[in-house]
Amino acid sequence: MTRKRTGRAQAWAELLRVSALFSVPGDALAGAAAAGVRPGRGTLCAIGASLCLYEAGMALNDWADRAEDAAERPHRPLPSGRIAPNAALTASAALTAAGLALASRAGRPSLAVAAALATTVWAYDLGLKHTPAGPGAMAAARALDLLLGATASTAASKTAPAGNGRPHRHAVRALPSAALLGAHTYAVTAVSRHETQGGSTRTPLAALAVTLAVAGAASGEPFGRRPGTTTATSPSGPPAPAPHPHPHPHPALPAGRPVPSRRVLPSGLALSFRPLPSRGLGPLLALAYARTPAALLLHAALNPSAALTERAVGGGIRATIPLQAALAARAGAPGTALALLGLVPAARALARKVSPT
């Protein structure tokens, strides 16, 4: 009985590609960083929704491809008979509903983004996957996932930028990060279309070019600032006026360095709060991102076999994590970036037991 349960758990782990789950939380965290807010309750809701919708897509993908997998991948859980097709479809529907429910807890705007994400996932698995629009649909899904994190985080954050009373509108600041993540996903998905048969040289080379371009963009100067780094506040009065717009309001600080905020205590003492430095961290993380799939993509281009192509796809999936970390660092959230980087060893270890593809 124990062996049977273990085998069933292994089958579900393969169906849901649990080793790829480590690449999901970073979407919401990078989205929060790009929107200029600290992770909070809304971010947690977005992470939960993203995990559910990602797993729904995995189960639905194998359900839709069960006939094709029977010929090309008979060892997969559905064609091998270890999981019934109806069970996979039911799990996909239940996970989709759970993801939407979690997103709704962060507000209606988050639910709207999650609904668009769920629609894209189902459209990809049920019709777009084997069409020229397939890579674009998958790229849109990943970009929407990052925007879900930005929307949920700003809607529930007390540190969201003030203005028109609708903090979720500030999630548009995450669009550049979403575009970069979408470009990476497009490249990986394009390569994955050849992983069962191989035979493509140009696609891995094109994906390598996209990877290098994304790495270059992700290594740029940080855009956006962490909340609480540019205004002064007093516990007994209104916010202090903004600093004079002089090119160098603090001559002692190098140009381009965020100006520390000052909080006045009741005793009259002043404390300065400086954000963690992220200028040098972003390029290092961008380099780590590019290094992960670059060699594998080059090998797949030189020898376009199915095995090497599949390895390149796996490397592209793992590279999502350092890319998310680089985007967080670029947005001025080095703490989030380093936390995401800590997921890489766990993802690599689990990938040795359960394939992410």
Image: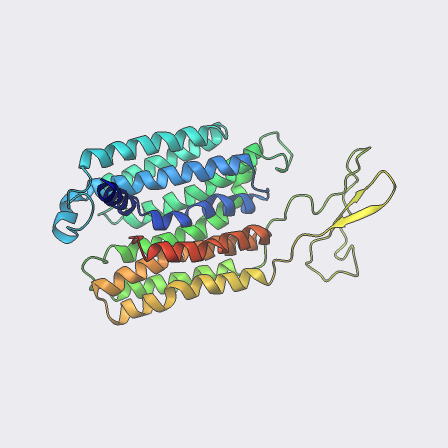
- Residues 309 and 301: in front is 309
From this viewpoint, which residue is outermost toward the bottom? 302
* Residue 293 appears in the picture as rendered: yes
What coloring was used for the rendering?
rainbow
From this viewpoint, which residue is outermost toward the right? 268
**Does 123 sit left or right of 337 as displayed?**
left
| 162 over 24 or under it: above or below | above
Give residue 282's position: percent from left, percent from top: 55, 60
| Residue at x 85%, y 38% (from the top left corner) | 266
Give residue 76's position: percent from left, percent from top: 20, 48
| 124 over 292 or under it: above or below | above
| Residue at x 32%, y 65% (from the top left corner) | 297
- Residues 49 and 141: in front is 49
| Residue at x 49%, y 40% (from the top left corner) | 149
Give residue 95's position: percent from left, percent from top: 33, 34
**Does 243 sit left or right of 142 as displayed?**
right
Number of labels in the image equals 0
| Residue at x 30%, y 64% (from the top left corner) | 204
| 193 over 155 or under it: above or below | below
**Image quarter in which the N terminus is found:** top left
From this viewpoint, which residue is outermost toward the left? 71
* Residue 244 appears in the picture as rendered: no
Indicate the quadrant where residue 161 lies: top right
| 74 over 89 or under it: above or below | below
Give residue 127's position: percent from left, percent from top: 23, 40
